[in-house]
């Protein structure tokens, strides 16, 4: 907020303890729950500018997902073009286009209550930075705490950062026995700008890392193209298969089984998994897709294996692309992890595995997963073998965060 009198450096401001939670749906102890926060990047409500009418961020009477302990119930979000309210320094969101300021009109805690599995390990990550304009040394401090709603929250390690850039933090928390609902709290503990200025936070992730099912079960039907089964030899053109729809004008989908060398330039193609695989270029270049129910704000991991058809010889190169988004709208091409392009281009010598992540936008309760043929080195009706397609909720930390430290 603007118009705040600055106080001495590193003033410690303790936020009020969150109130007890209302009754929450209980997760069965044997269930594996993917505990994904809602509105973790503070993108809802969207379209906010950087400065509100009082010269600070946008003060809102609540936002989706989060509850505040502030006595006035106000939550402060910032958008782009915010330099005027941040000592002339433009703050670009760590993720998306918006972020929160924990010290809004007062030092207050933002929290959410999530269903959790007792005994599982939760991993967390967030981005934090100080608001510019406070007194030297210009450092703000917050904590992320976990525990049963209404009880004492643990995890009181200070996260302290300056105003020059976002600091990245991560760690882990083991859900105690019997705790089927866990409170996740973002607590400002010190601000060099005073009680109503400081502690920017963004890109909060809280994920259950100990899941094996249902979190890691693929949401796609027939991702290995094993249905209908018992196909042998190449090129079975079928008028539809379980799970998948096609944009082909004739409605045909082509599956291959084993014993296919004669149709593949003399080279046998063994499936990447199971006994069958797909040829995207069936009777024509086409897109195969499925629509799956999704939770807005959650993170999905997609995986597939791809290779070229070898009819054109060892130098064959086929290209496909994965796209995702809201059904009926333009889908966004997906770039795999570690790749510089969304085009998946491979030769005929072996399967190549790809994996990427997709965050479900707000309001999107159904997501389309689509695979499209982009190019074939032979004929339009030849090319782009695909197998082992999966789409599952993210339960483990992204691969770029390899080390986590436990909460104390």
Image (tube, rainbow, N blue to C red):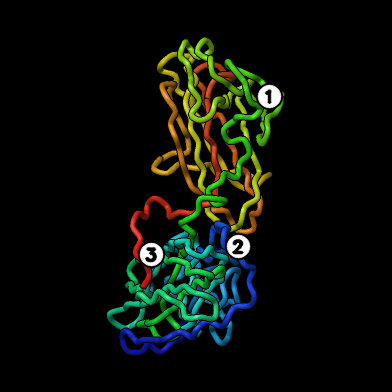
Choose mark 1 or mark 3, whichever is in front: 3
Q: CA distance from mark 1 to mark 3?
A: 49 Å
Residue that appears at 47% across and 14% down = 312
Crowd rating for badge 1 (residues with CA inside 10 Å; few <14, some 14–19, many 20+): many
In the image, taking residue 219 as reference, residue 401 lies left or right, namely left
Q: Quadrant of residue 127?
A: bottom left
Instruction: Name above or below for residue 58 compared with residue 272.
Output: below
Front-most of residues 19 and 129: 19
Residue 316: give x, y in percent of width and height: 44, 19
Rendering coords of residue 157 (x, y %): 35, 74
Q: Is residue 265 above or below residue 30?
A: above
Q: Quadrant of residue 196?
A: bottom left
- Mark 2, Cα crowd under 10 Å, few <14 / some 14-19 / many 20+, is some
Label 3 packing within 10 angstroms: few (<14), some (14-19), many (20+): some
Residue at point 60%, 23% (across, down): 255
Q: Could you say where residue 6 lies in the image, as x and y percent from the top left?
A: 37, 88
Which residue bears the numbered disc 2?
28
First-in-chain label (1 vs 3): 3
Q: Which residue is mark 1?
A: 252
- Asked if the residue at tag 3 contacts the one at tag 1, i.e. Cβ–Cβ closer than 8 Å, the answer is no
3 vs 2, front mark: 2
Q: Which mark is residue 25?
A: none
Secondary structure under the numbered disc 3 in the rendered image: strand
Return the x and y of residue 207 as percentages of the image width and height: 48, 60
Mark 2 against mark 1, which lies toward the viewer? 2
Q: Which residue is mark 3?
A: 171
Q: Secondary structure at mark 2?
A: loop
Label 3 vs 2, first from the N-terminus? 2
Horizontal side of residue 384 vs 243, given as left or right: left
Q: Give the Cα separation between the discs numbered 3 and 2.
A: 25 Å
Q: Is residue 268 visible?
A: yes
């Amino acid at each position: 907020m603007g118009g705040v009198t600055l106080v001495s450096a590193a003033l410690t401001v303790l936020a009020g303890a969150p109130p007890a939670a209302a009754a929450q749906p209980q997760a069965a102890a044997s269930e594996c729950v993917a505990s994904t926060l809602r509105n973790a990047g503070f993108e809802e409500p969207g379209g906010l500018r950087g400065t509100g009418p009082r010269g600070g961020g946008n003060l809102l009477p609540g936002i989706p997902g989060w509850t505040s302990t502030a006595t006035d119930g106000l939550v402060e979000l910032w958008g782009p073009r915010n330099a005027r309210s941040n000592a002339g320094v433009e703050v670009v969101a760590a993720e998306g286009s918006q972020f929160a300021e924990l010290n809004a009109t007062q030092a207050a805690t933002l929290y959410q209550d999530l269903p959790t599995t007792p005994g599982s390990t939760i991993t967390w990550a967030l981005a934090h930075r100080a608001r510019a304009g406070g007194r030297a040394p210009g450092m703000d401090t917050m904590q992320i705490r976990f525990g049963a709603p209404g009880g004492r929250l643990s995890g009181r390690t200070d996260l302290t950062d300056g105003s020059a850039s976002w600091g990245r933090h991560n760690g882990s928390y083991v859900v105690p026995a019997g705790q089927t609902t866990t409170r996740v709290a973002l607590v400002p503990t010190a601000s060099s700008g005073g009680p109503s200025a400081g502690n920017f936070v963004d890109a909060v992730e809280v994920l259950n890392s100990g899941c094996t099912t249902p979190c890691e079960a693929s949401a796609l039907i027939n991702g290995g193209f094993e249905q209908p089964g018992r196909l042998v030899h190449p090129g079975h053109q079928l008028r539809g298969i379980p799970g998948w729809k096609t944009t082909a004008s004739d409605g045909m989908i082509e599956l291959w089984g084993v014993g296919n060398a004669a149709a593949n330039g003399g080279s046998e193609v063994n499936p990447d998994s199971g006994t069958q695989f797909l040829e995207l270029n069936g009777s024509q270049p086409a897109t195969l897709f499925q629509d799956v129910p999704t939770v807005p704000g959650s993170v999905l991991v997609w995986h597939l294996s791809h290779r070229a058809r070898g009819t054109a010889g060892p130098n064959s190169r086929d290209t496909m692309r994965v796209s995702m988004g809201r059904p009926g709208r333009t889908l966004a091409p997906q770039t795999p992890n570690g790749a510089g392009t969304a085009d998946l281009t491979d030769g005929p010598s072996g399967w190549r595995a790809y994996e990427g992540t997709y965050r479900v936008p707000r309001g999107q309760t159904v997501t389309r997963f689509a695979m499209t043929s982009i190019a074939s080195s032979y004929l339009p009706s030849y090319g782009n073998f695909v197998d082992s397609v999966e789409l599952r909720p993210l339960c483990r930390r992204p691969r770029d965060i390899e080390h986590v430290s436990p909460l104390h």
